[in-house]
Amino acid sequence: MGEIVLPRRMFLWCMAVIYMAAFVSLYVQIPGLYGNEGLLPARWQLRYSGKPLLEQLLSFPSLLWLGPQLGLDTHTAMELLCLIGAALSLAAVLVEALRDGAVFFCLWVLYLSLDQVGQVFLYFQWDNLLLETGFLCVLVAPLTIIRGSRGVREHDRVTFWLVRWLLFRLMFASGVVKLTSRCPTWWGLTALTYHYETQCIPTPLAWFAHQLPVWWQKLSVVGTFVIEIVVPVLFFSPLRRLRLWAFYLQVLLQVLILLSGNYNFFNLLTLALCVSLLDDQHVHFWLRKAYKNNDSQTWLWPCYLLELAVWALTVFGTIVCFDLQQDTNKYSISSRTAFTYHQFNQFLKTVTIPSIWIGVLSLTWEMVTSMFRCACVSGFLRRFWGMVQWTVIAAAAASMFAISLVPFTYIESDSHARLWPGVRRAHELVDRYKLVDSYGLFRRMTGVGGRPEVVIEGSNDKVTWTEIEFMYKPGNLSASPPVVTPHQPRLDWQMWFAALGSHTQAPWFSSLIYRLLQGKQDVIDLIQTDVSQYPFHRQPPAYLRAHRYRYWFTKPKADGSYPQRWWKRVYDEEFYPIVQLGDTFLESMLNQHGLKDKSPPRIPNNTVAQATRWVRAQVKGVPAHTLIWTLIACSATFCLLQGLRNRNKPTERTPLAQKAAVTVSDHAENVADDSSDLCGMSDEQQAEEEDNGANSEDEVEEGEGEEMDAVSDDKEDEEGDEMEKEEIPKKRKF
């Protein structure tokens, strides 16, 4: 694999943006979800038993234990952690020097602290994926603050390989679980005929995608299986173009999901993981810049033939496994699953262990090549220090790879049972820190008989009932589906899950009814940030009830025109009975699930608490997705302007520095020039270093002494030649 300087920088910048979006999205919802008068107050999760602080942190890793020592309650402490995380990630977006391992460690600790008390509203796979990817950033990012250099280290390939392995686990497992779940829609290739209208929060484009013909929807499912199950194996291909094709296929899938559904930062995070498949040469191709390629052309044609064979085998296997046939009469392609569950299970048993060995060989190759690079560094002390770093990083990478095998093999029980017991024990020890996790998105397709949706209604007289419309989830038949990515409205998401069962399976729903009857503004803000859109903003309703409906997308009219409404619905059943404050049924549900406070919480009033409340007042009423996109747009604009300024800044070099700059490697020069083009990442210090002829790449640092010696020798030789030339005329003159 080629150099990964620019992809690594792109990955870290993207992770800083995603962290910022995640913290801001959660911060806006903290009062309504976890506040003292929220749905599930976070203080209930922290049981102060008088144990030493260190013991509490080890058993329940969360910085919220420090709240009482700062004079803060749990609600205020959560907001403070969110604000620190948002500010730190925003700073990392703007300043490359802060895209540092220590900074990413702080971001990981902050999000883990919040996740520990998040309860059901943070029980999502993308939250776990963010924590795992965030911890990998600690290993991938340079130690700028400690080491004082942003140069590439010889072992960077090893740490960046872990990102690729995570991408493989995510995509491969997501494809496999669709078939191991025995969901009839996935096996019948009809899942996408339901997906667009039954997903949690569809976008307007989902309505149009839902109107596509059935044969195209089935063919799209086939493409999904190929991209998620077959293509991930190419992530570890030694052939560069195969990895690039795998990259573009993964990007295609994620962009299509992003356009048709609101999955918060999940698709952006997966796209960031896909960057691990790139190299500097391809990024230079994007930038339309020359790149010195030292690869041998000897094996060019055999590589082409091998790539052609791989894609031909993929196409042939797809045609056979899904019985693809062209229907010339209907101008369509028919498809069906041409294998059984038993055959697929045998296939899974066959490939799971070999896929692990492919990972072992790929990681070993990266370790060995990086070790040789460390051993080739000039200077004993630098070589010794590089080998020490390599040893630590190699041990950390091997450990992360080993413990990741436990959740990865959940997809196949026999392979999981064959794992070394020591690996499983190691996974149990670190499981509380969520370093690795199992994944499998869209395991089963819900809403086959119509999308279930819970509609809450309020009344003051039990006669006239008014629906309470949410900002994001479907309710109003005429309301257009929203676009809220990368924000995740967590209450709307849980309302979608609650509609799949009874209210007893969602205890928090009774708390929602209770808070709405009380008229708690923090909870109302989760439903409508615009107070005027909430029908009971002047006076809380006296009675509340909830019904379940079945929703479907409307269809175009016979003449091809679009209907006035996006949705149609039919009544299904009662979801929650009519209740009021003090109602026996409501009180029993609250007591049964421990959702009532026994004593009022203490409200802090120190300086930190007042500052936190002031910040809250500034953003109150602003929709979360608007706030997030404003920050992202401003940050991207700042980075772009900074990059253009650094690129156009005139450079002044001394003659000796100019000559030294000529002798350094062309690749390192290109990296220094393009780092500001990508994200505007360079600061003034880096610009000065580059202007003085110093390069941040370790390859340049390795040979810097030898190159400067060569320059000085050349200079002495030139001076000697000039002296000889001056002496010759003198001899002729006399």
Image (cartoon, rainbow, N blue to C red):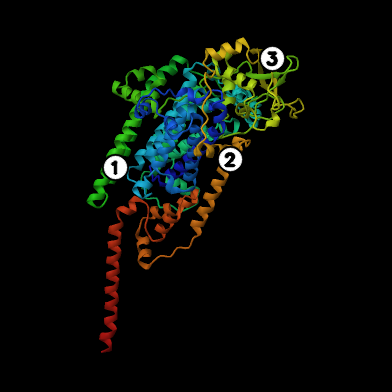
Residue furthest left in the image: 380
Q: Secondary structure at mark 3?
A: strand
* Relative depth, front residue between 543 and 281: 543
Q: Is residue 238 visible?
A: no
First in residue order: circle 2 vs circle 1? 1
Above or below residue 339? Residue 122 is below
Q: Is residue 185 visible?
A: yes
> Which is closer to the viewer, label 2 or label 1?
2
Q: Position of residue 215 (x, y in %)?
A: 61, 24
Residue that carries the numbered disc 2 in the rendered image: 629
Are there few (<14), some (14-19), or many (20+) residues within 10 Å of tag 3?
A: few
The answer to whether the residue labelled 3 contacts the one labelled 2, judged by CB atoms less than 8 Å apart, is no
Q: Amino acid at mark 2?
A: Trp
Q: Secondary structure at mark 2?
A: helix
CA gap between label 3 and label 2 equals 37 Å
CA gap between label 2 and label 1 equals 39 Å
Quarter of the image for residue 394 reads: top left
User: Is 147 placed left or right of 214 in the picture?
Assistant: left
First in residue order: circle 3 vs circle 2? 3
Above or below residue 17? Residue 222 is above
Residue that carries the numbered disc 1 in the rendered image: 389
Residue drawn at point x = 25 percent, y = 85 percent: 731
Residue drawn at point x = 34 percent, y = 25 percent: 427
* Relative depth, front residue between 327 and 179: 179
Q: Position of residue 604 (x, y in %)?
A: 51, 32
Q: Which mark is residue 571?
A: 3
Q: Position of residue 141 (x, y in %)?
A: 39, 42
* Relative depth, front residue between 230 and 7: 7
